[in-house]
Amino acid sequence: MEFVASVIAWLADPAHWQGRDGIPIRLLEHVELSAASLLAGAAIALPFGFLVGHSGRGAFLVLSVANVGRALPSLAILGLALPFTIQLFHVLEFWPAFVALTVLAIPPILTNTWAGIRAVERDLVETSRGMGMSATQVLWRVEIPVALPVILGGLRTAAVQVVATATLGAYVAGGGFGRYVIDGIARNQLDRIFAGALLVAALSIATELAFAFLQRRLVSRGLRAATERTVPRTAT
Amino acid sequence: MPVEFRHVTKRYAGDLDAPAAVEDLSLTVPAGQTCVLVGPSGCGKTTTLKMVNRLVEPTSGQILIDGVDVARHDPVKLRRGIGYVIQQIGLFPHLTIGGNVAVVPELLGWHAARCRERADELLALVGLDPATYRARYPHELSGGERQRVGVARALAADPPVMLMDEPFGAVDPVVRERLQNEFLRLQADLAKTVLFVTHDIDEAIKLGDRVAVMDVGGRLAQYATPSELLTSPTSEFVARFVGADRGLKRLSLRRVGELPLAMPPVARVGDEAGPARARTLADPFPYLLLLDGLGRPVGWLDRDRIPTEGLLEERLAVPMSPLLEPETTLRDALSMLLAAEVQAGLVVDPRGAMVGMVTADQIGATLRAEGGRTAEGRRPAAAGGTR
């Protein structure tokens, strides 16, 4: 009980809500790093997933990338990225973590995009072609919108993983909520460690909810209800 | 626009020794007519269809639409000018019904307002109220409704040629019969050049101006009008495919609307019972048919059960006769009467209003008359195609 009270006290302390090491700044850093990594991951994985899903070729590559990506511990990627980014940017902080998190974001986005597009019924694709859609039109007007729930699912998984893992950025002098955990360990302050962990968990949950909302807004009602089947069928 | 196949052969790559999917096919579909391709599975009928809009490219030979080789068109542009309906319908699940119907007009760059207008027009044409259906999604519709949307969508840009691949294959027999009737009504108005694939010989006989019977290996076994096919099959294969009940099938050549329709005594819900009773008693037909305010049949009243006074009420009537349409074939009508174990079927117009009555006796008489002589075509013999 005493411990819980100390964590609450830590979180409630106004001193922890201001300045360079205050919660608002750390939140901003954490979100900044996560969002940048997610966007970069999406910028690489989405087009690649569209291409492989649409053409039906290169599935082996997708699966290999996904498996290797999943097998590599994020910490290891962080270590691998370190020398490169130091050479490139001559600083620590943001970049090594950015590279590691981007690599982390790619597999779920890539596999879901690919699988989502592969799962679009071939009949639907052939009718689209038969009606006179070009390959690009089939992709943008049919395959992507129909696969959207699955694609967004991939982005959601990636986002949550990235937010949770962004904590590691603090190892390489980055910012974010990880600072509290790492510094807490260094200073042997349990309340700080635990408060940091709580903040990361809260942000992960918020990310999950934000994507759920996005999914609800972006996915066509025709697709959502197709799985929920809330509307009764009418007779002919 | 006529569609002509000239020595078209399709062999799938790496399958050189296997029988061709389509073997040296030559036939002409005259403009504005319906040609039904029928045959067992693996006879190449779907491949034949897909070569017209170049979803499949022939190994050799030519396909001409209005005299122009399809290979000379850009496939994407070619397809926008050809209506395409498949069995799985392929409605876009993420688009509304209105959006689905407007797909091709949108591809053609029509203005949004014109696309919407056209979608409404077509939904009405296939018997779906635009106000009710336009904003719905495909999963909210029944199989029959979706099939209608599929046809509306294929008609959207008013293409002169339509390709239909088992479009009514996935619905139950009652709905299929109604969709076939609608197809015949639409086709009578629109006169598209239609290539229609089915494995159901009855559907082929009912819908086709000409029927192409195909055999396994993609060979054309016979290309003829439905009545020729029934009276003089040119090979053992065609005879077997058409079936042993060719006499009965000849009933498929005749439509209910061609018979002189009788009219039973009728009255409307809410009419005085007394005069209606008197009229029914004076009529040789022993039942009174009750209609609703829109002229749609409600049911029958035995003449002895008609009240002597008061108003006729809906609950008095017994609905039992199957509803037929003028386009229903006599064969389907007979099987519906047998299934319902009744003597008479009611013929209604597309709005459901009473047109007349057909009895099993009438159909029997037609069958006897047809059996006595060689059946003649239900239409003046069309100009012969190749083969």
Image (tube, grey):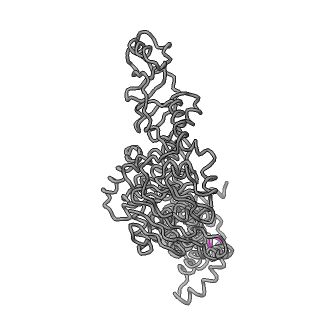
| Residue A178 among magenta residues | no
Q: Nearer the viewer, residue A91 or B202?
A: B202
Left or right: where B19 falls relative to B178? right
Residue B198 seen from this side: yes
Q: How far across and down, in percent of the image, does residue B56 sit?
A: 52, 70
Left or right: where B59 falls relative to B114? right
Segment colored magenta: A182-186
Residue lying at the far front in this picture: please name it. Answer: B373
- Give the position of the N terminus of chain B as an image quadrant: bottom left
Q: How far across and down, in percent of the image, does residue A201 sit?
A: 59, 62
Q: How far across and down, in percent of the image, does residue A215 sit?
A: 50, 58
Q: Is residue A221 above or below residue A50?
A: above
Residue lying at the far bottom in this picture: please name it. Answer: A87
Left or right: where A135 falls relative to A84? left
Residue at 63%, 62% in the rendered image: B216
Q: Is residue B344 above or below residue A73?
A: above
Residue at 42%, 30% in the rendered image: B296
Q: Nearer the viewer, residue B91 or B256?
A: B256
Q: Is residue B262 above or below residue B149?
A: above
Which of the 4 image quarters holds residue A101? bottom right
How would you classify the magenta stretch by its main secondary structure? helix
Residue A175 seen from this side: no
Q: How many marks?
A: 0
Which of the 4 image quarters holds residue B166? bottom right
Left or right: where A174 falls relative to B276? right
Residue lying at the far top in this picture: please name it. Answer: B308
Q: How far across and down, in percent of the image, does residue B51 sit?
A: 50, 68
Q: Nearer the viewer, residue A131 or B59?
A: B59
